[in-house]
């Protein structure tokens, strides 16, 4: 069966696995309601969470990645059914009472360890989000809002990716071939950001981002419903609700962070835009005003002109085997961990090119399993991602339930003449995703509810972004980057050039992220919104970005991150700031420092989401970072020659 789950040897098995989980959850609900308040209450709640997550998490992965439609459909159905049960449990008054009795008992609470206390509070937070503390009428309203929000999210996501059509005669004949023809219409399915023809990019931008009335009303209803739900359950705004328990904690802190970062970036961003404008004048003297559709293209042109980074020159040094050896060597030196390939049983994997790795510690033994689904195949989603299939937890019998994760990439297959070769970007992504996997393996918490990457969004990306710093350090790269034919190491100057090339127009790129994050905060801030979502977009773009808003466009209708990262889009910037500080303070001097590796495991990875994120950061940096520290860390990364300076010194 899939992942060694016997029921899942066929699609019908999902029904069986789901029935088993639901039966188990009914027994656990009864047990929770009849157990006197104590640590056992938290343990039962966690068993309940585990029983449902073991099916839901696995199904979440299978529904998007399995090549067989019948498996995908069965998994989708299981996700829906378990989701419904979770909603029911979150509004089960009797179940909530058993947890409330524990939280109200000061004597018992003071005897619990911090992790158990935090997990109890997190479970209560889930109840309160569903409006359990409200009277019956309001509770019903909360449940209905939750259901409506879920539907709107799905509809908005679908709408965000739908192409726009236009009569082909509207466009000049010489650019029509760039778009898919459909009778008398042309389909525009994206921004064509890399196209060298300015006119193609302009047309794509104006057509793809042309406002769609249905999508606009979906977004307005989604934002209004999220706000109503947040206020119903006792928060000022949706952002206040979404940020509880995060590193930032409040919308005010996020706004302060984004405004200070924007101020610090403004000079550099202006300089970047000036360079892009000069380049545009050189290539297109008739129309040299820099527009939003120019930014990604001309920053790429500048990068190529200044550093001439041809991925083809790097690929031969980054065979998949060499990169995996590099990761193995790094983890072994830093954390005492090795990766071993394991034979899989029949039916355990969903595609024959999936590899299973056992993660083994030199003294603690087996820590968990990583399934590597690395290669392209038809119908496979293109995003690189990490999935938790089973969370780690301490079982009732004293044994540890080992975590199981999947890393999904889209690498090319090997050919007869060459192994799988990675571009520098693919290599960095492999390190990034492995950062998540190590968090899952080493976040060995007592409770499954906070295992590994089950932690606040603005902390979850820290371990993965930190791995990018290792991937861009010559001392690390030099351990594994060898030409697959000659065995020659990758020259040092090629690594420094690659690192420096990433800083070209990096301020403008970061400024764009600040604009998106600020827009997200305003949309999820005080309601009713003072203006339409498009007018807010125009204002925010002028304040936080600097390139003019284009009339009759509505970029926000394509902002699919509003669904999964509502009020939390800033998280990536804040995680990068923390990763940067950890790298500079703890690893820049010696990326293989075992004592630092152990401190990193002990202070940051080991707790999963079982400890407040800011306390983990304080433990690692041995100081409490301020908003200014976060901003300085991000801005100092833009300075030329940081890595080269470290290497030379």
Image (tube, rainbow, N blue to C red):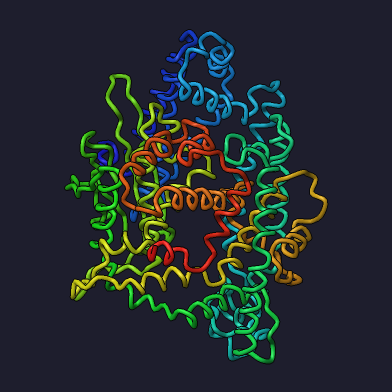
Residue 80 visible? The answer is no
Quick one: quadrant of the C terminus?
bottom left
Residue in the picture at 37% in, 41% down? 440
**The quarter of the displayed image where residue 411 is located:** bottom left
Residue in the picture at 39% in, 41% down? 600
Q: Where is residue 378 drawn, in percent x and y?
A: 36, 64
Q: Where is residue 231 drawn, in percent x and y?
A: 73, 34
Residue in the picture at 60% in, 53% down? 631
Q: Where is residue 499 drawn, in percent x and y?
A: 43, 68
Q: Nearer the viewer, residue 111 or 627?
A: 627
Q: Is residue 176 above or below residue 241?
A: below
Q: Is residue 381 left or right of residue 632?
A: left
Q: Is residue 334 above or below residue 484?
A: above
Residue 141 visible? The answer is yes
Q: Is residue 393 above or below residue 564?
A: above
Q: Nearer the viewer, residue 278 or 99?
A: 278
Furthest residue to the right? 530
Q: Nearer the viewer, residue 18 or 106?
A: 106
């Amino acid at each position: 069966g899939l992942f060694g789950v016997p029921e899942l040897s066929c699609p019908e098995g999902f029904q069986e696995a789901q029935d088993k989980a639901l039966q188990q959850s009914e027994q656990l609900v009864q047990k929770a309601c009849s157990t006197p308040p104590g640590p056992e209450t938290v343990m039962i709640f966690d068993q309940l969470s585990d029983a449902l997550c073991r099916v839901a998490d696995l199904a979440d992965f299978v529904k998007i990645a399995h090549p067989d439609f019948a498996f995908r459909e069965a998994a989708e159905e299981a996700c829906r059914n378990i989701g419904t049960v979770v909603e029911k449990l979150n509004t089960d008054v009797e179940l909530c009472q058993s947890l409330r009795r524990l939280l109200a008992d000061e004597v018992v609470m003071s005897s619990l360890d911090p992790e158990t206390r935090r997990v109890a509070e997190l479970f209560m937070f889930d109840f309160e989000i569903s409006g359990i503390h409200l009277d019956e009428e309001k509770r019903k309203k909360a449940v209905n809002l939750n259901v409506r929000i879920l539907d709107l999210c799905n509809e908005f996501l679908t709408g965000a990716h739908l192409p726009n059509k236009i009569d082909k005669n509207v466009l000049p004949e010489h650019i029509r071939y760039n778009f898919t023809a459909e009778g008398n219409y042309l389909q525009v399915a994206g921004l064509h950001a890399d196209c060298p023809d300015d006119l193609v990019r302009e047309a794509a931008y104006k057509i793809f981002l042309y406002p769609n009335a249905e999508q606009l009303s979906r977004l307005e209803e989604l934002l209004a419903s999220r706000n109503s739900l947040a206020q119903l359950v006792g928060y000022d705004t949706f952002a206040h609700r979404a940020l509880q328990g995060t590193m930032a904690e409040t919308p005010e802190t996020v706004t302060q962070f984004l405004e200070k970062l924007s101020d610090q970036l403004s000079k550099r961003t202006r300089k970047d835009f000036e360079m892009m404008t000069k380049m545009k004048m050189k290539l297109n003297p008739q129309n040299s005003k820099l527009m939003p559709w120019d930014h990604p293209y001309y920053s790429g042109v500048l990068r190529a002109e200044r550093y001439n980074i041809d991925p083809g020159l790097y690929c031969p040094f980054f065979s998949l085997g060499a990169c995996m050896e590099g990761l193995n060597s790094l983890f072994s030196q830093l954390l005492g961990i090795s990766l071993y390939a394991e034979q899989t049983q029949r039916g355990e994997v969903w595609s024959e090119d999936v590899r299973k790795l056992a993660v083994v510690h030199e003294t603690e033994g087996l820590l968990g399993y990583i399934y590597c689904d690395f290669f392209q195949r038809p119908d496979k989603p293109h995003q690189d991602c990490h999935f938790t299939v089973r969370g780690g937890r301490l079982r009732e019998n004293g044994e540890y339930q080992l975590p199981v994760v999947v890393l999904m990439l889209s690498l090319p297959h090997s050919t007869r003449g060459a192994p799988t070769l990675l571009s520098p970007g693919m290599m960095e992504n492999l390190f990034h995703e492995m950062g998540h996997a190590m968090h899952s393996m080493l976040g060995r918490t007592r409770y499954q509810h906070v295992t590994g990457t089950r932690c606040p969004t603005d902390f979850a990306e820290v371990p993965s972004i930190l791995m990018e710093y290792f991937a861009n350090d010559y001392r690390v790269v030099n351990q594994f980057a060898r030409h697959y034919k000659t065995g020659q190491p990758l020259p040092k100057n090629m690594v420094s050039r690659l690192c420096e090339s990433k800083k070209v127009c990096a301020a403008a790129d970061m400024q764009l992220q600040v604009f998106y994050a600020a827009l997200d905060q305003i949309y999820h801030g005080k309601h009713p919104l003072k203006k339409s979502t498009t007018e807010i977009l125009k204002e925010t773009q002028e304040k936080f970005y600097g390139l003019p808003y284009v009339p009759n466009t509505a970029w926000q209708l394509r902002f699919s991150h509003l669904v999964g990262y509502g009020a939390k889009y800033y998280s990536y910037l804040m995680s990068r700031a923390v990763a940067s500080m950890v790298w500079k303070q703890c690893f820049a001097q010696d990326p293989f420092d075992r004592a630092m590796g152990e401190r990193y495991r002990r202070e940051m990875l080991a707790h999963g989401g079982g400890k407040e994120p800011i306390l983990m950061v304080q433990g690692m940096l041995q100081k409490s970072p301020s908003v200014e520290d976060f901003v300085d860390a991000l801005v100092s990364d833009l300075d030329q020659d940081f890595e080269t300076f470290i290497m030379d010194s």
